[in-house]
Image (spheres, grey):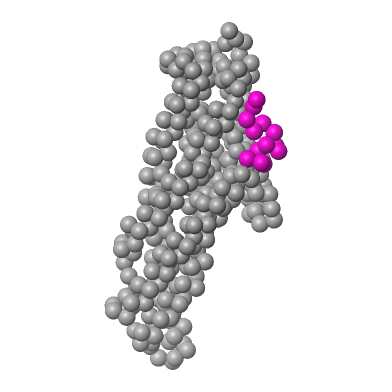
Amino acid sequence: MPINITDAERQEEANRDLAAKLKLEKPFKPKVRKLINRMGNDLESNIIATGAPQNLDRYKAQTEGLISEQYENTKNVFSGRLIKQLEEEPEDSNIWKVLLAIGAVFRLGSKKDVLAKLRADSVVRSNIFIDRSVTQDTSQILATSARNLQAAADTARVKLALELERQPTAIELAVAAKKQFLQRDLGRAETIAATTTQRAAEGIKNVDTTVYQDYRNSLTALSLGLSEAKFEEFWITRGDSIVRLFHQQADGQKKVGGVFIVGGESLRYPGDDSLGASLSNTINCRCSNVRSIDEEPNYNLEP
């Protein structure tokens, strides 16, 4: 039977995605909050000692470790979902008649062999995606934290000078800067948890999609005279009142030319910023890229 071919099936898949993401975020948030609290404590002590915020290089390993762990946990949930759907497809379906015909050229003689190849390719590409994404996310998080630490110190200095009608002491400034930073950035922990999990989940799903498409649309498929694959991708929102306007407008949009156009920006999947999408289009996103797969009967492949 086709995979996610109806609107209802696609929405159901998106709802399952969201439930899994929320479950993954729950244990991640306190770990991020702990890191931010450490930054706040260090800000206080560093201002007392030097009069300025600390260098954030000291958090790189910890931040990278947290993000890497979250990507791995998310991979364990989301990687191979498409392959699992294919595994549940009957071997006599149109989808499998095509996949097995392609596989035969590569001496993949069974459904099990084809699935093993797809899984292996997915693992390799997922690891490449995770390595690149963890480095990028770590850099973005620490860059924002550095700006926020400096802003907290600057804001505290100005406020205290106005309140005290004199320049604050190092201890006064340190205490106020820490408070200013934590008031802002502890709330940011939820954004980091949601955005990191979204990028990981949707990015890993995109890896599986790419693996399938590369196999299905290979030169081998063309040489067999196969008709074009009926493979489509849809942007699906969570469907409630807090979905941002551009994402509401994108709900149900079909990907064209490898991208969704959302708010005038190109995204390969929800949460993707690799093509230059803005933060306002990617952070705290709860949308899903849901795939629909079907095949026209290829009568030349009938036994």
Please identify the quadrant where the C terminus is shown. Answer: top right
Q: Is residue 295 visible?
A: yes
Tell which of 34 and 208 is nearer to you: 34
> Residue shown at 53%/36% (left/top)?
81
Tell which of 229 and 116 is nearer to you: 116
Identity of the residue furthest to the left in this view: 50
Q: Is residue 300 left or right of residue 156?
A: right
> Residue shown at 44%/51% (left/top)?
70
> Residue shown at 41%/53% (left/top)?
67
Please identify the quadrant where the N terminus is shown. Answer: top right
Q: Identify the image quadrant of residue 233.
A: top right
> Residue shown at 48%/23% (left/top)?
112
In the image, residue 7 lies in the stretch drawn in magenta = yes
Q: Position of residue 252 (x, y in %)?
A: 66, 40
Bounds of the magenta segment: 1-13
Q: Position of residue 189 (x, y in %)?
A: 49, 62
Q: Is residue 267 visible?
A: no
In the image, residue 97 lies in the stretch drawn in magenta = no
Work out whether 161 lies above or below 12. below
Q: Identify the image quadrant of residue 143.
A: bottom left
